[in-house]
Amino acid sequence: MAEPMERHWLQMPCRHILLACMLFSMPTLPACSRESRSLGPGQPQTPPSGFADPRITYFEDNLYQTAQGGRYFSWYGCAACHGTEARGERDLIAVQLRHSPSFVDVYASIAHHRGVSFGHDGMIPTEQLWQLAAYVRSLRALKREQRRRQDLDQAGEPQAMSWSGTVR
Amino acid sequence: MTQKGHLAFLLPLASCAGAQTPLAPAGDQAAGQYSLLLLMLWVCGILYMLVLGFLAMGLWRLRRGAPAGNEPTLETPSDAVLGKTLWIWAAIIVVGLLLLAGASFLLERRLAAAEAREALLVRVSGHQWWWRIAYRDPRNGSWIETANELHLPVGTTARIELGSADVIHSFWVPNVAGKMDVIPGRANAIDVTPRRIGWFRGQCAEFCGLQHAKMAFDVKVETPAQFAGWLALQARPAPAPEDAAALRGMEIVTRGACAMCHSVRGTSARGRPGPDLTHVASRRMIAAGTLAMNRGNLQGWIAQPQALKPGTLMLPVTLEPRDANAVAQYLGQLK
């Protein structure tokens, strides 16, 4: 007796579920490019040249770069003053919503930061300034819960001159 | 097969010797696991050979030709002995499995029993992509920090407490200890009793991001006297710069970008995110086993870490050639 022909997958009983899964997962594919990272020595060595600097769009749209900025944000102890609990002028979200500074402004304010603790002139390498500026800009669109989630993720990371050890 | 093909086949054997292999144990824990590995090899090997032997026997008997129309079926085995031998076969499998389970249980008990002999406490924290290592000073209970180089006194059981600052890593020094995952939010620990003096290599064994492969560390097993000397040196603050260039280097390191992330004890550089540099030149490698420690590599690493270890969280600091030279000169003196 001849073997029955193998059925095409589109004729299988669960084809509706398969198709639905594929359709629903499609919109997530473009998100992969938002994580793309450029590595190696060819990173920015100069501050933004102006509002139209193409690097601004790249850094702001790239989740990897903004996430790295968030990491350095806690490494450099920025969260000590500008953390989730910050109020008034230190609340970076409120300040940005009030004055809507451009990327160039944010970059300059970090590069020439004059805080209570220390200034930053020449202390932070250029690439990190780009990442930090992109991260600070991204805070505007972040809900408080999301920010708290970020804080939790980085709870074990060192903060400037203090590190209480890994989370155990 | 071509000669190249032969060579490719031999390549895995390279891992059988050297500073990073479970097949040349240099510690109690590694030796225990090695003997378990040998037992598994024997048990599984003997059973495998038996299976192949019976298969060959069956094929040989078939080739000799059974008369047509008398083909054996599952219901009525042609061989009357087969029914009995199957029982024996099942018993052999059960005995083999019991042997392995029993040996594994006994080994676990032995590994756990090392806890009673712990004489040294070391904290190893995984970071992307390097190891922070801190020793508890037996004299005063303070913590002495270093990075990427683990020193252990021979014949002494050390308890290594593992923690992660970011993602899951895995602590693996095959020659001396086994493998233990380093998980954020979880307190894991492993006991290590090295028995052979020498340099060994540890490696992160859980994929942890871009530079996972370059997250290694050196392990030096030395005599208790050598270890005590080394620990005393690590506890000291950084030595003073020896010449004008190194003095300039110290100024740049302590006042510039380096101090944002690195500590040099005894100076104003007190950043915690990166490896402690107090005695960086006393280590054998830099950048977590990426480069040998020498003046050229040190200066190259400072100038362009992204070219040597793409994605590393250390970023290039723009320095005038004279200043870069001064920084390398200073760091090279931090013995």
Image (spheres, helix red, strand yellow):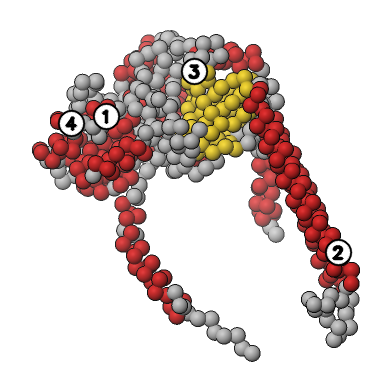
Q: Are marks 2 and 3 in contact (CB under 8 Å)?
A: no
Residue shown at 37% from the left, 15% from the top: B250
Which one is nearer the viewer's eye here, B117 or B199? B117
Residue B213 got which mark? none
Please give the residue where the numbered disc 2 appears in the rendered image. Answer: B85
Query: What crowding class fits label 1: few (fewer than 14 Cα within 10 Å), some (14-19), or many (20 or more)?
Result: some
> Label 2, label 3: how many angstroms apart (C-alpha)?
64 Å
**Three-letter amino acid code at disc 2?**
Thr
Name the residue beneath numbered marker 4: A87
Q: From the viewer's perspective, tell me whether residue A158 is left or right of residue A122.
A: right
Q: Which residue is mark 3?
A: B144
Local secondary structure at mark 3 = strand
> Disc 1 marks which residue?
A78
Relative image position of residue B261 (x, y in whole percent): 36, 26
- Foreground: disc 1 or disc 4: 4
Whether labels 1 and 4 belong to a single chain: the reply is yes
Please indicate whether residue B218 sits to the left or right of residue B265 in the image: right
